[in-house]
């Protein structure tokens, strides 16, 4: 690196340091009743990173399960849920193999990645949070890959949770890409997007012999959902996160790669019946109306097919796969209307 390049990098680093100071101030928990914790907790025999934030520790607790797999929300999550914190205490968790949990335990810890192990991790975390925060039950929210963990946790230990909320709900991993392909092609034709039509017709419906077909699907899913801008913003928010270093960002990115290699093949082995069936607690899906990654049509079918004491489906107009973040205020409105009545006072 030349002297001029080093100087430019130093200027950029100084700018991000100023942004971190600003974000620490702007996103601070200031209420005397609030809670703002970041800590490692021993879960499943290793130390795993969690944050707990809210303006009133007496509020109901949301345990948020990130997607990816490995795409921890903590590096940028300080900016994801600010409107939620008046009504809920939000727990974000760097799952096994992700972000700070990966950094703490090293890449070899990824060897233990399995859906069964991570479901048990989630159950252990829920038990810890109930005791630590003095709550009878938690609200369990799972996004995308996290919705697989959420369904399995809710079925394994329903007494820990007042309600399970899925978003970008995975309903049928084996049929997901076929349903997404049909929805994408219909969207492309409705918009008369000739390039999208040509590329989608060129790859045809799955299964695909290599990764090219999946790549085309993902490119147009992100484009039609407006997800490209959001995905790019995550990195900027992470670089400006209070208390986060470049090393933390590298760990976050490495965790996404390691987790995907280990866990995505396991998700393809799950069929719809394993995720559906009978639940012993209320189930709600809050889904972007135009989710082309985990298709909205399949999420609707999931809710229609299951048995639960109470169940419901809420669509977010204009929302896609990341509606929980991009349309966080609308998502909060749905939580307040449909989930708060199901929670206990403590």
Image: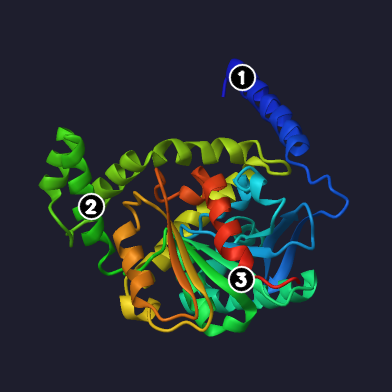
How far is disc 3 from disc 2 in space, using C-alphas?
A: 33 Å
Give the residue pinned by disc 3. Answer: 342
Give the left or right position of residue 208, taking residue 256 as reference.
left
Give the left or right position of residue 311, taking residue 185 as reference.
right
User: Of discs 3 and 2, which sits in the foreground?
Assistant: 3
Residue 230 at what x, y percent from top left?
A: 47, 39
Give the left or right position of residue 78, taking residue 313 as reference.
right
Q: Earlier in the sequence, mark 1 or mark 2?
A: 1
Question: Which residue corresponds to the image point at 73% horizontal and 74% vertical from the top-left?
Answer: 130
Q: Indicate which disc residue 183 carries.
A: 2
Give the left or right position of residue 118, taking residue 264 as reference.
right
- Residue 162 position by quadrant: bottom right
Residue 340 at what x, y percent from top left?
A: 63, 64
Residue 70 at what x, y percent from top left?
A: 51, 59
Q: Earlier in the sequence, mark 3 or mark 2?
A: 2
Looking at the picture, does residue 12 appear above or below residue 267? above
How far is disc 3 from disc 1 in space, using C-alphas?
A: 53 Å
């Amino acid at each position: 690196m030349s002297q001029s390049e080093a100087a430019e990098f130093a200027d950029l680093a100084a700018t991000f340091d100023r942004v971190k100071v600003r974000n620490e101030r702007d996103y601070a928990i200031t209420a005397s009743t609030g809670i703002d914790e970041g800590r490692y907790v021993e879960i499943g025999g290793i130390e795993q990173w969690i944050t707990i934030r809210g303006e009133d520790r007496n509020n109901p607790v949301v345990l948020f399960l990130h997607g990816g797999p490995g795409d921890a929300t903590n590096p940028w999550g300080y900016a994801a849920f600010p409107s939620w914190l008046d009504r809920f205490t939000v727990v974000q968790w760097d799952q096994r193999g992700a972000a700070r949990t990966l950094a703490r335990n090293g890449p070899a810890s990824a060897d233990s990645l399995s859906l069964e192990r991570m479901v048990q991790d989630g159950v252990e975390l829920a038990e810890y949070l109930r005791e630590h925060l003095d709550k009878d039950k938690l609200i369990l929210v799972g996004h995308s890959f996290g919705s697989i963990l959420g369904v399995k946790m809710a079925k394994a230990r329903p007494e820990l949770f007042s309600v399970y909320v899925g978003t970008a709900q995975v309903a049928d991993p084996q049929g997901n890409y076929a349903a997404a392909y049909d929805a994408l092609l219909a969207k492309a034709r409705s918009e008369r997007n000739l390039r999208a039509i040509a590329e989608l017709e060129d790859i045809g419906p799955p299964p695909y012999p290599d990764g090219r077909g999946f790549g085309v699907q993902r490119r147009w899913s992100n484009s039609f959902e407006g997800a490209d801008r959001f995905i790019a913003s995550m990195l900027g928010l992470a670089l400006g996160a209070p208390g986060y270093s470049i090393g933390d960002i590298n760990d976050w990115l490495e965790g996404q790669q390691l987790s995907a290699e280990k866990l995505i093949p396991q998700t393809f082995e799950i069929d719809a019946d394993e995720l559906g069936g009978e639940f012993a607690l209320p189930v709600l899906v809050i889904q972007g109306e135009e989710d082309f990654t985990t298709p909205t049509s399949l999420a609707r079918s999931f809710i229609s097919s299951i048995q639960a004491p109470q169940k419901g489906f809420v669509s977010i107009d204009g929302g896609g796969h990341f509606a929980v973040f991009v349309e966080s205020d609308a998502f909060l409105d749905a939580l307040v209307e449909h989930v708060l009545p199901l929670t206990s006072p403590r």
